[in-house]
Image (cartoon, coloured by chain):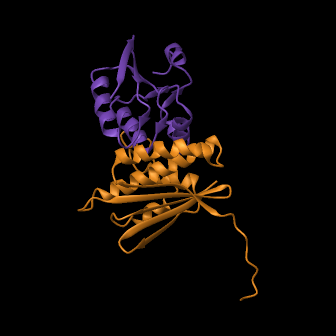
Chain colours: A purple, B orange
Amino acid sequence: MNITKEVHGDLLIIDIKEDRIDAAAAVTFKESMREYVAGHDGRVLIDMKQVEFLDSSGLGALVAVMKLLNGRSLELAEAGDVVRKVLSLTRMDRIFIMHASRSDALADRDAA
Amino acid sequence: MNGVAAVSQPPLVEFFAAEFNASFENVRGTLIKVEQCLGESPLSAARSRDLIMVLGEVLNNIVEHAELASTSSKICLGIEQCGSSMMVSSRDNGRPLPLDVLEQRVPPAGDGSIESLPESGFGWFIIHSLVDNMTYEREEGENLLTFSFN
């Protein structure tokens, strides 16, 4: 799975360079994310710009990632139309911290 | 001949048909193909996205049930256009679908704690948020799901 990461201070930014987080990809996604967030103690942001499709399995995988963050909320940036629709239908957009853009997340010092 | 006048309906035109082995990869591939066709449909871009979302949840649910069966399951998907509506039907020879999922109209939720956040159960809720006329029949060892979308 094509995922990259950057660290900015206490903020870990994860770039998903895949179009779809769906049932076919959910297990691999969770495993990859587990490796990336292991040992990181601060904020975790997933840049969703490239993700065009998220289904209920992908949503479950995001929830699983959030449970790895020791009480912090998982942050998502640049969610596209389908991602935002899935999150709002399921009310999960109230659980994750949603940022319109990556730079909003970088500027936001109060999200932690 | 009875006294009831025939109601004229738009013709049913085949729009998309596919048969595939039940797997998440095949569902993904089918959704991509349907998406490519939907530009020709009467649906708006937003409704097309909704339809793909529903189809994905329905088909992936069938795959989940199929994986419990002892033999590999096949899914037949048909989409027909009827005027401005799309009529969707799927047929599969997997295990019977549990009837309670067809009623799932409340989103799964935890008790407020992060540990209790649900990781599954969202699929049927998403389906019922977007579709209100889904029917399910079990007939001769097959599940048959149908719904319309416009």
Q: Position of residue B35 (x, y in %)?
A: 52, 43
Q: Position of residue B147 (x, y in %)?
A: 55, 61
- Using the rendered image of the protein, determine whether residue A101 is visible from the camera's viewpoint: yes
Q: Is residue B12 above or below residue A20?
A: below
* Closer-to-camera residue (B50/A33): B50
Quadrant assignment, res B87: bottom right
Q: Residue furthest top?
A: A9
A7 or B35: nearer the viewer:
B35
Which residue sits at x=35%, y=44%? B25
Residue furthest left as drawn:
B70
Looking at the image, residue A44 sits to the left or right of residue B6; the answer is: left
Query: Is residue B111 visible in this depiction of the protein?
Result: no
In the displayed structure, A80 sits above or below B101; it is: above
State the residue at coordinates (32%, 29%): A1
Residue at (62, 42) in percent of width and height: B46
Q: How many marks?
A: 0
Q: Position of residue A60 (x, y in %)?
A: 39, 41
Answer with the quarter of the image where residue A67 lies: top left
Q: Nearer the viewer, residue B42 or A78?
A: B42
What residue do we see at 48% from left, 37% from top?
A: A53
Q: Image height check: is B22 above or below A95? A: below
Q: Quadrant of the N terminus of chain B?
A: bottom right
Q: Is residue B136 above or below residue A2?
A: below
Please state if A109 lies on the left or on the right of B5 as rendered. Answer: left
